[in-house]
Amino acid sequence: MSKGRPELAAAPGLVLNYLREQNRPYSAQDVFGNLQRDHGLGKAAVVKALEQLAQQGRIKEKVYGKQKIYFADQDEFDTASDTDLKDLDDEILSLTSKVQSIQQSCRHMEAELKELTGSLTTPEICKEIEALKKECANYTERLSKIKAATNHVTPEEKEKVYQEKQKYHREWRKRKRMATELFDAILEGYPKSKKQFFEEVGIETDEDYNVALPDP
């Protein structure tokens, strides 16, 4: 006796019971995938069992293009009464409500988990606190040195420096205006361009050094 014969003999009964229990359409690949995991059936045995059961009229077969779908013969099941259908509808509504409630709870737990995952752990918080303490101590030490220094600039000294800066800026602006007027007068009778004139005379401008005159 070959090794595959017991498998072939058991396959029709297993396939038939499976289709009746599930009572939904399946392809041969679906039936094989589900039964192979639990019963170790090979695909050839499953396909042969499905074809055999369909030929015997014990299950139904539908062809959609190149694919065949198999399902239990619905005539074998009792016809549900209106009361049974209503009970099933009520049960579906109840289960749907429970599913929605569970899904909502899952979303809340996922959000909480995400928040907790992004939070620092206790050791990480302690390490961060120590680092901040050291940083604060460094700033405190620097501030103390600054306060203890004797070379602070007084408001009067600061104002004096500011006035001198303004004075030099005014002088800079005045001299630049005078130089510009002088160059313009010379260039009126100069046969070459302004750039050539500056190169020949050796004049360097603020623009050559990317220096801009401060605003008044």
Image (spheres, rainbow, N blue to C red):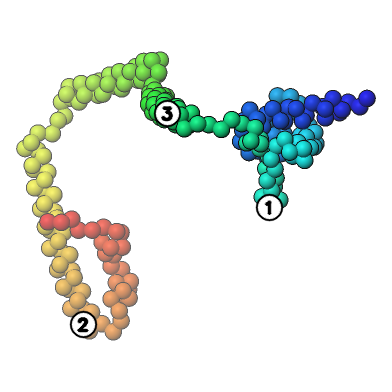
Judge from the rendering whether residue 137 lies leftward or rightward of residue 42; answer left or right: left
Q: Residues within 10 Å of mark 3 (few under 14, many from 20)?
A: few
Q: Which residue is denoted by mark 1 in the rendering?
A: 65
Inspect the image, locate mark 1, and give the three-letter code of the amino acid beneath it.
Gly
Label disc, if present, on residue 188 of the rendered structure: 2
**N-terminal-most mark, 2 or 3:** 3
Q: Is residue 107 visible?
A: no
Q: Quick one: SS at disc 1?
A: loop
Find residue 64 and report its horizontal and vertical position in percent.
66, 50
Q: Quadrant of residue 181?
A: bottom left
Q: Residues within 10 Å of mark 1 (few under 14, many from 20)?
A: few
**N-terminal-most mark, 2 or 1:** 1
Q: Quick one: SS at disc 2?
A: loop
Inspect the image, locate mark 3, and give the three-letter code of the amino acid beneath it.
Asp
Tell us which disc is closer to us: 3 or 1.
3
Q: What residue is at 40 percent from the left and 15 percent from the top? A: 123
Find residue 28 and report its horizontal and vertical position in percent.
71, 39
Judge from the rendering whether residue 120 lies leftward or rightward of residue 46; answer left or right: left
Q: What residue is at 25 percent from the left and 82 percent from the top? A: 190
